[in-house]
């Protein structure tokens, strides 16, 4: 679905596959499950929480296990991944 200029308040919002343009989120939980990437353009966020479920949660847990369970090489891999995220915008 596409949401334009919608005000979300005190809600849990599923992000997967949705488009949010010029929306505001206040005191919401934004949930991503690892499905189709959401599109988020010019939105405002206030007091939001992020939740990763399903496949997205598995990915976060796997990265945590690499970071904490594979010594210095694992820590370097995850740090490098985070650095790459900071440098490169998502591909469309």
Image (cartoon, helix red, strand yellow):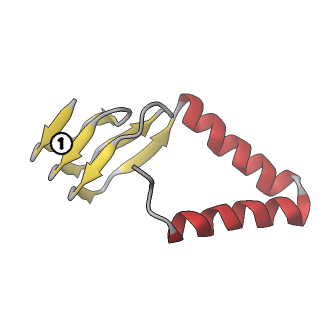
Q: Position of residue 81 (x, y in %)?
A: 65, 61
Q: Position of residue 48 (x, y in %)?
A: 33, 52
Q: Using a 10 Å C-alpha cutoff, classify the residue at mark 1 as few (fewer than 14 neighbours), some (14 to 19) or many (20 or more).
A: some
Look at 18% across and 43% down and name the residue there: 9
Residue at image point 18% right, 48% down:
21
Residue labelled with disc 1? 8
**Residue farthest along the front direction in this orientation:** 92
Outermost residue toward the right? 71
**In the image, residue 13 lies at what x, y percent?**
30, 35
Q: Secondary structure at mark 1?
A: strand
For residue 35, side relative to residue 56 (left or right): left
* Residue in the image at 19% along x and 35% along y: 2
- Where residue 41 appears, as percent x and y from the top left, is 24, 54
Judge from the rendering whether residue 44 lies leftward or rightward of residue 51; answer left or right: left
Q: Nearer the viewer, residue 76 or 53?
A: 76
Asked whether 88 or 68 is in front, the reply is: 88
Give the quarter of the figure containing the N terminus: top left
Query: Tag count in the figure?
Result: 1
Report the residue at 28% width, 50% height from top.
Answer: 40
Whether residue 34 sits left or right of residue 81 in the image: it is left
């Amino acid at each position: 679905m596409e949401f334009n200029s919608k005000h979300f308040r005190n809600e849990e919002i599923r992000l997967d596959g949705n488009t949010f343009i010029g929306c505001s989120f206040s005191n919401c939980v934004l949930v991503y499950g690892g499905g189709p990437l959401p599109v988020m353009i010019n939105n405002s966020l206030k007091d939001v929480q992020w939740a990763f479920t399903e496949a997205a949660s598995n990915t976060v847990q796997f990265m945590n296990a690499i970071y904490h369970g594979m010594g210095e090489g694992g820590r370097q891999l995850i740090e490098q991944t985070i650095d790459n995220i900071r440098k490169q915008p998502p591909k469309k």
